[in-house]
Image (cartoon, rainbow, N blue to C red):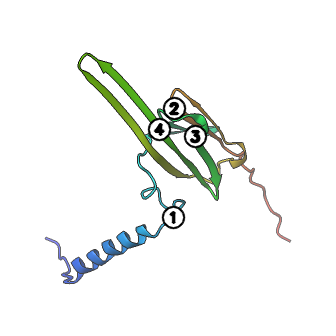
Amino acid sequence: MSLVRYQPWNSMEQLRREMGRIFDNSATTEEESSIATSDWTPAVDIKETEKEFLIHADIPGVEPDKIDVHMEDGLLTIKGERNSETKEEHEGYKRVERHRGSFYRRFSLPDTANADKISAKSKNGVLEITIPKQEKAQARKIQVN
């Protein structure tokens, strides 16, 4: 049996932290929070190879010119908006499905990422972002005088 220290105000402190988080999130801007600005979140696969990082994002129904990918201060941002509509008519019924909304994802990149050579392409609803790695600096001995 282990001893557990009784802290009578622990529940109140937890409630205060939760309330603080609620009010702090409401004051954030689009660049600061993806929660407040995203209507949907695309599924993303991230893969690392010896020479690069690959990001595959499922963004069906979004034209490539409606996707914004940019890199700033070590953060890769993917955002855009989709507006698609599917209509189906048969005997006795009509069905219309609409998919609308903005998306916003951010990724912190490691120091080994080469931000100057990032490339992106979209094909069949999948966005592929290639982030090459920088060449490793060779260690060198420094002479102490």
Q: Residues within 10 Å of mark 2 (few under 14, many from 20)?
A: many
Measuring from the top left, give residue 11's x and y in whole percent: 22, 77
The residue furthest left is 1
- Position of the N terminus, as image quadrant, is bottom left
51 over 30 or under it: above or below = above
Q: Is residue 87 left or right of residue 63?
A: left
Q: Who's the residue at 42% across and 57% down the image?
A: 35
Residue 93 location, quadrant: top left
Q: What's the amino acid at mark 2?
A: Val
The residue furthest top is 91
Q: Who's the residue at 37% across and 26% down the image?
A: 87
Of marks 3 and 2, which one's residue comes earlier in the chain? 3
Say which of marks 4 and 3 sits in front. 4
Task: State yes or no: discs 3 and 2 in contact (Cβ < 8 Å).
Answer: no
Q: Secondary structure under badge 4? A: strand
133 over 89 or under it: above or below = below
Measuring from the top left, give residue 96's x and y in whole percent: 34, 30
Q: Residues within 10 Å of mark 4 (few under 14, many from 20)?
A: few
Q: CA separation, marks 1 and 4?
A: 23 Å
The residue furthest bottom is 8
Q: Secondary structure under badge 2? A: strand
Of marks 2 and 4, which one's residue comes earlier in the chain? 4
Q: Who's the residue at 30% across and 27% down the image?
A: 95
Q: What's the amino acid at mark 3?
A: Lys
Q: Is residue 85 left or right of residue 70?
A: left
The residue furthest front is 92
The residue to which callout 2 is attached is: 126
Residue 91 location, quadrant: top left
The residue to which callout 3 is attached is: 66
